[in-house]
């Protein structure tokens, strides 16, 4: 697992204490993409945390972006997010 994946996981774990968390580096799928030329990566995050209960989807995405703010400046070019509360099954 890459160092960046571990750093994303650690930041999200600190912020949300998730019940489930997967982080996938999908940078290899975007080789040659204009936004990937600067070395920043493409990631997919799936997270289930009580912190998301009662939050609309946009607020959840903003919360994840806030938790990863520094890495969004240095390491992350694109971020696909699936953020759910524990009682959501879809």
Image: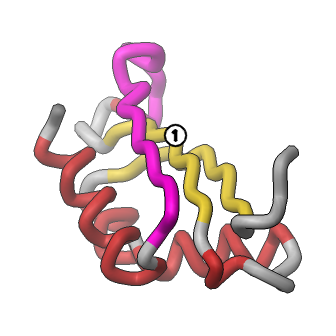
Query: Foreground residue, 79 or 2?
Result: 2
SS state under label 1: strand
From the top left corner, tell me how far across and down residue 2 is, in percent: 16, 36
Query: Foreground residue, 16 or 78?
Result: 16
Q: Is residue 21 magenta?
A: yes
- The residue segment tinted magenta is 18-35
Task: Kindly identify the residue that appears in the image at 87 percent across and 76 percent down.
Answer: 56
From the top left corner, tell me how far across and down residue 85 is, in percent: 73, 68
Residue 41 figure quarter: top left
From the top left corner, tell me how far across and down residue 50 is, in percent: 64, 79
Q: Is residue 25 magenta?
A: yes
Circle 1 packing at 10 Å, graded few (<14), some (14-19), many (20+), is: some
- Left or right of 89, for residue 43: left
Query: Foreground residue, 84 or 29?
Result: 84
Looking at the rendering, in which quadrant would you find the N terminus? top left
**Residue 52 vertical placement versus 42 (above, below):** below
Colour pattern? secondary structure
Task: Kindly identify the residue that appears in the image at 83 percent across and 59 percent down.
Answer: 88
Task: Kindly identify the residue that appears in the image at 80 percent across and 65 percent down.
Answer: 87
Task: Kindly identify the residue that appears in the image at 81 percent across and 72 percent down.
Answer: 58
Task: Please give the residue where the numbered disc 1 appears in the rendered image.
Answer: 44
The residue lying furthest to the left in this view is: 3
**Residue 27 vertical placement versus 84 (above, below):** above
Residue 67 figure quarter: bottom left
From the top left corner, tell me how far across and down residue 28 is, in percent: 35, 16
Looking at the rendering, in which quadrant would you find the C terminus? top right
């Amino acid at each position: 697992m890459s160092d960046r994946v571990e750093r994303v996981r650690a930041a999200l774990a600190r912020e949300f204490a998730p019940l489930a968390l997967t982080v996938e580096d999908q940078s290899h799928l975007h080789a040659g993409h204009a936004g990937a030329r600067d070395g920043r990566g493409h990631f997919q995050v799936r997270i289930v945390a009580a912190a998301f209960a009662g939050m609309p989807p946009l607020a959840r995405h903003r919360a994840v972006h806030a938790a990863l703010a520094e890495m969004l400046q240095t390491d992350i070019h694109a971020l696909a997010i699936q953020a759910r509360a524990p009682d959501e099954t879809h």
